[in-house]
Every structure is written in structure tokens, then in C-alpha cells.
Image (tube, helix red, strand yellow):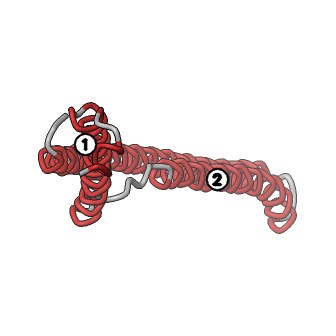
Amino acid sequence: MCDPIVMAGVQILKGVAQYESDKEAYSAQMDANRRNREAAQRGYLADVSRLKAIAAEKGADKVRADIKLKKQRQSEIATMLNSGAGGVSAILRDIGADVNDAFNENTAAYMQDVTSLQRKSLEAYGAFEQTWNSQPNPARPNFLSSMLGATASATESYIGMKGYQESSNTSNTSRRVAGSPTSNISSSYWEKA
């Protein structure tokens, strides 16, 4: 059997190797977390910029529609006034009501688009946050605790080996006594002497 001190040394070396392995695993997990979080952030920023571009496009569409309605209104007013089809206030009232309805419809459609884009922005942030927070948080390896564990294991191994050696020495001693030439001499021999 090996010397108990050698066994204790092996246990300590195992503890050092385990610490180094834990440290490498920790570093690898932290690098993976960093890459995943950077990818999530890039994805979120890409989503937000795409949503902002869509919002700007929707805003430009609304402005174009509003300008088109104003031009249409001015054209209809000019046509009605040139044809002499009634009083000026009646013409403005009739055409204004039609244009205001169309303007209100454009505004309502634009507001629905804005609300939808805000909801999509919140969903994008939710996906980003979920990815960010779902990364495993590994325990940082501690050299002191690793060495204490290795030392405890080495101590147990040493004590176990010492106990084994002592019990084997005791059994060897008892065998030698039992098998010694003096053990065959009867007790009466000693009494006679």
C-alpha cells in the first residue's frame, strides 16, 4: 500500500486540478454569457431601429395623406366656388365635413400603427430581457475552499491509511506471536523454571 503522505499529496494535487478545471469552466461560461448577452443586445437594437424606421415611414405616410386631403379640399372648394353652386359658407361646411372625416380616419389609422409599433417595441425588449436574465450564473471557484476540501480529503485518507497500517501491524504481530517457537512451549515449562 502507498505511504499515507503520498496519498495525502495526491489528494491535494487532485484538489488543485479540480480548482483549475472549475476556473476554466467558470471562464468559459462567463464568456458564453457575455457573447449571448451581446447578441441579445444587438438583436434588440436592430429591432428598435427597424421599428423606428417603420414609425418614421408611417408618419411620412400620414403627412402625405394629410397634404393630399388639403389639396383635394382646396380643389373642391375652388371648383364649387367657380361653378357658383351656393353660398361660400355652405360649400366650406360641406367639403370640410367630408375632408375632416377622411382626416380623422387617417389619424386613427396612424395611431393604431403607432400603438402596434409600441407593443412590438415592448415585445422586443421583453425578448432581450428574457435572454439577458436567462443566462446561467456560475459559482466562482474559490481556491481556499478547494484547498480546504482537498486537505480534508487528504486528512481522511491519511487517517484511514494510518488506521489500516496500525490494524495490519497488530494482526501481523499477533500472527508472529502465535506462530513463534515459544508459543508451542506449554505454560508448565514456565512454571517449572
In which quadrant is the N terminus drawn?
top left
Image coordinates of residue 109 in percent, x first then y, are 71, 49
* Mark drawn on residue 17: none
**Among the 4 quarters of the image, the one containing residue 182:** top left
Task: Label 2, secondary structure: give it.
Answer: helix
Between 135 and 8, the one nearer to me in the picture: 8
Q: Amino acid at mark 2?
A: Arg
Q: Residue at x 40, y 43 (%)?
A: 43
Left/right placement of residue 33 relative to residue 27 reads right
**Among the 4 quarters of the image, the one containing residue 36:** top left
Give the labeled residue for mark 2. Answer: 119
Q: Is residue 135 visible?
A: yes
Q: Residue at x 28, y 36 (%)?
A: 185
Give the labeled residue for mark 1. Answer: 173
Q: Is residue 29 visible?
A: no
Foreground tag (2 vs 1):
1
> For mark 2, does the 10 Å Cα neighbourhood hold few (<14), some (14 to 19), or many (20 or more) residues?
few
Q: Give the number of callouts.
A: 2
Between 5 and 162, the one nearer to me in the picture: 162
